Amino acid sequence: MLSPLFILISIIHRLKADGNLFFCQFRPGLGKKLFVLVKFRTLTVVQNTYNEGNRTHCMSSFGKFLRKSSLDELPQLWNVLKGDMSLVGPRPLLPEYLELYNADQRRRHDVLPGITGWAQVNGRTAISWEKKFELDIWYVENRSFQLDMKILYLTFFTIFKNPGKQVAATFERFKGNL
């Protein structure tokens, strides 16, 4: 169903950027088991003219569009099909953060990581790490089919109505309805 969108993004990416279409990175999943997360690549490597020999990563306007619209996350559907991820769950963070988690924060690995999650629809990048972990743990403790459907709905609302901004008071509004 999404193959026309994948093809369109691939063609535009090929015309606008050089290098690989995908960005792949190890991330910890269920039980802290590492898997390869796949995304559309949004950064390009350019030669730094100020410091010879150094390379700098920069984002093209198409890369900014992919990130703002969250379309860079679409290849993660492959991770869902493989069973490494779910549509909804705590976003998988970098493996180097594993040793920094406290006992509560480690509970985020009791469920499959998700393409979207409770923290994403409650502030995304506008909230603190502490709040993200609080929201992730709340999701682990309260997950249900009904909550997942609300998160999926709110994800589309967040992306299409208000990209990159917080959906006001979502956490408090829905916490009492479950």
Image: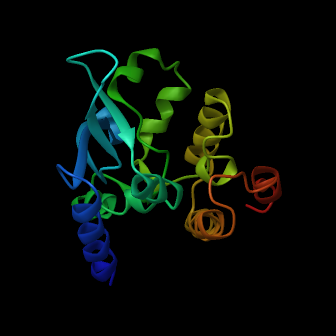
Residue displayed at 33% across by 36% down: 31
Please provide percent x and percent y for residue 47. 25, 29
The quarter of the rendered structure image containing the N terminus is bottom left
Please provide percent x and percent y for residue 122. 69, 50
- Rendering colour mode: rainbow
Q: Nearer the viewer, residue 60 or 1?
A: 60
Q: Nearer the viewer, residue 97 or 58?
A: 58
Does residue 53 sit above or below 121 in this rendering? above
Residue furthest to the left: 19
The quarter of the rendered structure image containing the C terminus is bottom right
Residue furthest to the front: 49
Does residue 143 sit above or below 23 in this rendering? below
Does residue 135 sit above or below 161 in this rendering? above
Please provide percent x and percent y for residue 9. 31, 69
Residue displayed at 58% across by 41% down: 136
Label count reads 0
Residue displayed at 64% across by 55% down: 121
From the viewer's perspective, is 103 left or right of 92? right
Q: Quadrant of residue 15?
A: bottom left
Please provide percent x and percent y for residue 106. 47, 28
Residue displayed at 56% across by 26% down: 104
Q: Nearer the viewer, residue 38 or 8?
A: 8
From the viewer's perspective, is 112 left or right of 36? right
